Image (cartoon, rainbow, N blue to C red):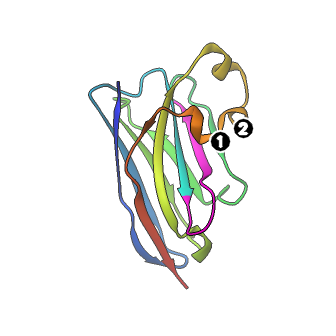
Amino acid sequence: EVQLQASGGGLVQAGGSLRLSCAASRSTFVNHRVAWFRQAPGKEREAVSSISIWGHTTYYADSVKGRFTISSDDAKTTVYLQMNELKPEDTAVYYCAAALETLEWRITPHEVHLNPTEYSNWGQGTLVTVSS
């Protein structure tokens, strides 16, 4: 079973950039859907972005579209979330999560599978703080 390690959070001024990394261990991300979720204080955990390692398709929440980019390395061991033009409202703990993709996952839009309970493997959170 794949284990995940998230890193790259920090403090940045509004308009700045950060790159989060989600590294796999014990296995790779082959045949997985990898997603980034975030949770701000007092709010529910929300999906930010996801990528199908098999199909290379991606999803972005409307709030980050055009500013964030999700990608994976050729070895399929690390998934990145490049975050540009950061805003104070992006402040949250960011988590990466992975799930094995079924055929159904591969033929339906990413939006169908954004419930955190569908992801069985989670990394620890990494805090992103954006100051105004």
130 to 78, vertically: above or below = below
- Nearest the viewer among 110 and 14 is 110
> How far is the residue under mark 2 from the one under mark 1?
7 Å
Residue at (73% x, 24% y) in the render: 108
Image: magenta residue range: 39-52
Does the magenta segment cover residue 132?
no
- The residue that label 2 is drawn on is 111
Q: Is residue 22 above or below residue 43?
A: above
| Residue 59, numbered label | 1
Disc 2 residue type (three-letter): Glu
Question: Element at badge 1?
Answer: strand
> What is the quadrant of residue 79 in the picture?
top left
Which residue is located at x 64 percent, y 21 percent? 106
Dot 2 or dot 1, earlier in sequence: 1
Please provide percent x and percent y for residue 7. 34, 55
Measuring from the top left, give residue 4's x and y in whole percent. Answer: 35, 39
Kindly indicate whether the residue at mark 1 contacts the one at mark 2 (C-beta within 8 angstroms). yes
Residue 63, relative to residue 111: is it above or below?
below
Number of marks present in the image shown: 2
Tell us which disc is closer to us: 2 or 1.
2
Give the amino acid at mark 1: Tyr
Q: Say whether residue 48 is magenta.
A: yes
State the quadrant of the N terminus: top left
